Amino acid sequence: MFSKEDYDDWKILMQTHLAAQDDDMWYVITDGPMRILKVNTAATIIEGAPQMVEKHISEWTAVDKKKPNLDNVGKDIIYKTLDKNMFAKIKTCTTAKEIWEKLTQLCEGNDQTKENKLTVAIQKFDNAKMKPGETLAEFDERFSSIIIELTSLGKEYSNREIALKVMRALPREWDVKTIAM
């Protein structure tokens, strides 16, 4: 199973990689497999828009033939990035869209889970203090991971709020430097 940070990184990399494969690839992930359509010349125009029907395979152009395969390409790319444990959880999905949605649900959870994660992350932010013996670099790394977690959950603080929090999180021996800031 992905850690939250690993999943967030994986998701960004996958979105970029899939979109780079073909201009329509991301639509396959978000909307499902592409259908090859044509205007139905036998039907009347309804509300100003022509009625669309699926093209028969014998009518497909060379470009048309590549579009339905984007779902297979998307599935293949996603499969190659998963370990056996994660693959076992999505192997019954039939489309790239279903796989993406299942992985999102597994790694991000439902709305209640997301709300709970956000509450915990906000508490981490509110309670952040530099620990005794911790270097500024270590504190910065720990604090940055909290900010990244909050951002991935949809909570963002202004630079001013973050700077004030950091100054309040520093120990008393930093007071002179904090006042100077």
Image (cartoon, rainbow, N blue to C red):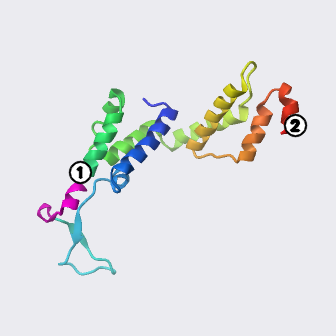
Which segment did they paint magenta? 56-67
Relative to 154, residue 126 above or below = above
Mark 2 is surrounded, within 10 Å at the Cα level, by few (under 14), some (14 to 19) or many (20 or more) other residues, namely few
Does residue 101 sit above or below 179 in this rendering? below
Which residue is pictured at 30% across the width and 79% down the height? Answer: 46
Left or right of 142 on screen, residue 2: left
| Element at label 1 | loop
- In what quadrant of the picture does the C terminus appear? top right
Determine contact: label 2, label 1, CB under 8 Å.
no
Label 1 sits on residue: 69
Magenta stretch holds residue 57: yes
The residue drawn where x is 72% and y is 23% is 135
Q: Classify residue 1 by image quadrant.
A: top left
38, above or below 178, in the image: below
Taking the magenta stretch, the answer to whether it contains residue 28 is no
Residue drawn at point x = 14 percent, y = 64 percent: 56
Apparent side of residue 78 relative to residue 41 in the rendered image (left or right): right
Q: Amino acid at mark 2?
A: Ile
Mark nearer the N terminus (2 vs 1):
1
User: Residue 100: x and y, percent?
Assistant: 37, 44
Q: Position of residue 62 (x, y in %)?
A: 18, 60
